[in-house]
Amino acid sequence: MTVPRVRFTFWKAVFLVIMVAGVYCTFIRFFRGLGASTNLSDQFPWGLWIGFDVMCGVMLAAGGFTLTAAVEIFNIKRFHSITRPTILTAFLGYLLVCAALMYDLGLPWNIWHPLIMRNPHSVMFEVAYCVMFYTTVLALEFSPIVLERFNLQKPLKIIRNVMVVFVILGVLLSTLHQSSLGTLYLIMPNKLHPFWYSPLLPVFFFLSAIAVGLAMTIFESSMSSKYFGRELELPILRDLGRVLVVVLALYGILKFEDLYHRHVLNLVFVSGYEQRFFLLEIFLSVLIPLAMLLVPKIRESAQGLYLAAVLTLLGFVTNRLNVTITGVENAVGGRYTPKWTEVVITAMFVALGFAIFGLAAKYLPIFPEEKAHLPALRKPEVAVSEFVVPVHAGD
Amino acid sequence: MSKGILYDATMCIGCKQCEQACATENGLPYDDKIAAQEVTSAHKYTAVMTRDDKFMRKLCMNCDDPACASVCPVGAMKKTALGPVTYDKGKCMGCRYCMAACPFSVPKYEWEKAIPGVRKCIMCSKRVAEGKQTACAEICPTGATKFGDRDALLEEAKKRIHDKPDTYLHHIFGESEVGGTSVMLLSSIGVNNFGFRTDLTERALPMYTYQVLSRIPDFIPLFGTMLGGIYWITHRRQDVAETEAKENELKGGAR
């Protein structure tokens, strides 16, 4: 018993240190400005906060729409028991993205401006609207979990009857803005390196969001079983692994075709700065996970799936950072490395994500089969019976 | 009629009076130290650059179809009918997409300020609206910087190249770069010597994103119907299965 307890307090200490540093950096950011708190410059108007907190944040939250689409729209019922944690991750992810955006925006108090000042020609405008609506949709998809916790049957019934509309809306909005994060870069044909600049950028961003959504679901299920002592839903994760193989294969083939038709495939074999980062990205995101998951022995094992998922996540995080930073360094003539304050703020949001997920898992019915163990507020048996009919997203 | 600026580097003597006039017009500090900076910044909207005995001016090109105005989610950047590309800090939320998107890396940011804004040459939009020249053109002692109707200036630039083919590089930078710009540059050596990109597309940059963005209104009903349709089909199967199960149960119960 002592070993897990020591580990737990260790992570608590780490969390505390990050939060204290985070509060200090928050002070620097808002009282002394972006210049004092970042290594951003006129050459690099976008850095770690856009590249990781926003670009990767939205991508890592893609499990929500991927899994709700599979369960609710494609009616793949066996994935049902793992949708709740993915909706929680997605909701949390988008809230953190919005919070992180407040740090990066120069005039964050004007964040509501797109509501009344519209420029429909701007990709950013479209992303802003999609993220705004989708965060609302996620709140609604998440609401049954809270309503159930407090056993509020009436609103629960109402929301379940209209849930399918929100699910469809959520998948639609996600498709639009996940791909649009790639479209953002279409306006920079002369700035972004040809490894990454492609008319297919939106397609790549969308496909990789699905891959990451699947990998993230495997990752968080594995973590939950490790730290919350839950039983691992291995058969489900194996199925997800299979889907991941197909998505990664599609992504890899499309990437190859894209490089080939744009006549830049030869650049892959010419040693260079961008080439090294590109190879790192491709090996981590596609080649190694694909090779691993195609071996039945690895695909069937919990550790193999976990490792392949983690590599996929790292690979696509590298991809987003490559598009945001590596790919433009040559064109603007310089190198960007984040300042320590930028790293601390990013670490703070990651830590907050883990901490809030842990708290939610502890106090809300996130893992359906364990609902009975939660401290009952009213009648626990009602809550348990709710779970029997697997129809709606929040279930 | 859209206005423009023609800068002819062969006529420039590098006196930097345009820099001074620009600073005065925009209420920016100006001294010898700032004059020595050959780059534009948040406190210097135009810079005269020197390479040996050649000069070149850097200022906002005020594109005909500007990327900055196209990407701005709140429309803080605007292309006016008269030519200048203006900026409204009251609208700006500081996303800096304009800076990332600009093919000439013109917009600069007030990084050191707690309440920062984007800074760039706005082609003296107020003066131009009043029918006056830009400050830099008005002060120029040699006529190297000339203000006027863009079409007329373009004709004049072509004529100058035609009249003195040995003096000029036969290219008007800004005639067709990124779909054309209000500011046009003439010189005897390539502008790439002064850090300008010469591999720019002739297509206006906003088209690259708009050709995707404009499809979204058509995409929404199609994709929505598809998702709804898949739901309808997959759940119909479920309904049938449930009904059959019930019927079987009834039959079983009637034994």
Image (spheres, coloured by chain):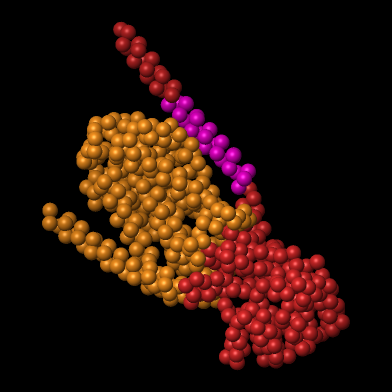
- The residue positioned 45% from the left and 62% from the top of the image is A102
- The image shows residue A369 at horizontal and vertical percentages of 26, 38
Q: Can residue A251 be seen from the camera position used here?
A: no
* Residue situated in front as seen by the camera: B34 or A53: B34
Q: Can residue A103 be seen from the camera position used here?
A: yes
Question: Magenta: predominant secondary structure element?
Answer: helix
Q: Is B235 above or below relative to B25?
A: above
Question: The chain shown in red is which?
Answer: B
Q: Is residue A252 magenta?
A: no
* Residue situated in front as seen by the camera: B67 or B245: B67
- The residue positioned 58% from the left and 42% from the top of the image is B220
The image quadrant that residue B246 belongs to is top left
The image quadrant that residue B109 belongs to is bottom right
- The residue positioned 49% from the left and 47% from the top of the image is A133
* Residue situated in front as seen by the camera: A362 or B87: B87
The image quadrant that residue A343 belongs to is bottom left
Q: Colour of chain A?
A: orange
Q: Which residues are magenta?
A: B216-238
Q: Is residue B220 magenta?
A: yes
Using residue B232 as the reference point, say whether residue A10 is left or right of it.
left
- The image shows residue B132 at horizontal and vertical percentages of 77, 76
- The image shows residue B239 at horizontal and vertical percentages of 43, 24
- The image shows residue A36 at horizontal and vertical percentages of 43, 76
Check the image and name the residue furthest to the top: B255
Q: Is A34 above or below relative to B249?
A: below
